[in-house]
Image (cartoon, grey):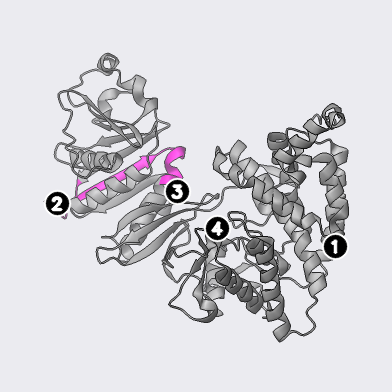
Amino acid sequence: MSDEAARAGTHTVILPDEAATARLAQDIADILKTGDIVALSGHLGAGKSLLARAMLRRLAGDPALEAPSPTFTLVQSYDSARGLLLHADLYRVRSPDELDDIGLIEDLDLAMTIVEWPDRAGARLPAGRRLDIVLEVDPENPEQGRIATLSGGVLWRQRLSLAIGARRLIDEAGWSEARREFMLGDASSRAYERLIRPSGETAILMISPPRPDGPAIRQGKPYSAIAHLAETVDAFVAMDKALRSLGLSAPDILAQDLVTGLLIIEDLGAEPVVGADGPIPDRYEAAARLLAELHRHALPTILPVVEGRDHVLPDYDREALAIETELVLDWYAPHIAGVTLPAVTRAEFSRIWEKLFDEIFETPATWTLRDYHSPNLLWLPDRVGHARLGLIDFQDSVLGHPAYDLVSLGQDARVDVPAALELRLLAAYAGARRGTDPGFDLPGFARAYAILGAQRNTKIAGIFARLDRRDGKPGYLKHLPRIEAYLRRNLEQPALAELKAWYETYLPKLYAGQEKAEAKAEADPAEQDRPEPEQSEA
């Protein structure tokens, strides 16, 4: 198959035996969504029913599902945990008008539908959500071999490329017999699967397709470009190799498809740095000391990906820091606090941050992994030294202030870090830094820590509001009280007095916490009568 064909959404797959056909069926079933139509074509005996039955078993989560061919009933329906499934065999249909009598067309939007002999439906099967699979007997292996040609429109293009590419990479890397288990993803577009061989050996399939450009929001650039978020999997590969070169436990890359955005990486396990009661102090301190070890090195800014191809670490510059803080104005303010801030108030917010950023850029930049917190840190008790800490999710790394990653750890967005433990982390980090650099400026570092803590929690408040409002992920809202508490902790730093006053005036729900702000308003009639800020026409 040519690259041009793949880009056009057409893929040809050689299936040497029934097991390969079943694996293709499972791979396609895993990417189906409600409203999708899989149209299976091919001569009698080409394997359509085998493919359909394997897909239904995967979708239903029942390997023993009988799934009889609906040759005479025309349509068979199944209820599953993933929703309604429809299996249609239209071989006996002589006219598309007959479909009106069985209600198939009316149910297409409500189900995942597999249709054999789709040509009998004429134009009744909508093209937009349709994936066509044409099966033929492989002339070089007529007993068991089949050739499948898959094609779909724009809604299928990336899904199909990832499914076919993942299967190819898994097979070529020697994991074809592995069971694939979906792993809980994160707030990004990336996805992960655990590959489990019959022997019990495991690896991780990382699915990280090239990031599509969003709408231009400033100077012709999308948010992801301004905030320096990784556009391709190259960034992960480069940082992974760089971290491993320092003896740190980033996952070994076992196989890669950089064009599609697929990696098979070492499984570092699932032992966390948190327990039932929250952070495990010794593991958090080890994470703080690892940062100190990292920051004492003069680190390169251009990192190799593959031969002749490099990744340049971007600067965590003013533009990136500023646009992240503005998320709180665009998302938290209107959707959580219930206010739309006027342009003059937003301008004041930006002016205050610009002054604070001045201090940040006085310190030489270093590698900033950016999401250095509990979901991305794993404990490896069988290793020694700094290698006991497994590092994942560092593709958005930038060149920034050394305090940023310590803030991510000490003000963990997913788990409460008590103030006493946060001070221990600062002490552990500072002690390690002073061990190699007696001139380490702890007071200056502490000020920068508070500034970046305020910046990070301001950003996260906006991100969690956006995940709820735009992406339909309300689960992140449960973390907002923690983010609000961290923000208050940072704003007690004298250097942030002006920013604290801004929050008290314009976003008291974020500064004081929603329940405290409401209690204050109930106790103070003047607060209740206070007019909201002027509504912006924007």
**Which label sits in the foreground, 3 or 1?**
1
Classify residue 118 by image quadrant.
Answer: top left
- Where is residue 91 drawn, in percent x and y? 18, 27
Q: Which residue is mark 1?
A: 358
Lower position in the chain sequence, tag 2 or tag 3:
3
Separation of residues labelled 4 and 2 (CA atoms): 39 Å
Position of residue 311 relative to residue 488, above or below, is below
The residue that mark 3 highlights is 7
Disc 3 marks a residue whose amino acid type is Arg
**Numbered badge on residue 232:** 4
Amino acid type for the residue under numbered disc 2: Gln
Please tell me whether mark 4 or mark 2 is closer to you in this view. Answer: 4
Residue 55 % position (x, y): 27, 41
Question: Of residues 332 and 4, which is closer to you in this image?
Answer: 332
From the viewer's perspective, tell me whether residue 224 is left or right of residue 20.
Answer: right
Residue 155 included in the magenta stretch of the image: yes
Q: Label 2: which residue?
A: 144
* Front of the two marks 2 and 1: 1
What is the CA distance from the residue labelled 2 to the residue labelled 1?
69 Å
Q: Are marks 2 and 3 in contact (CB under 8 Å)?
A: no
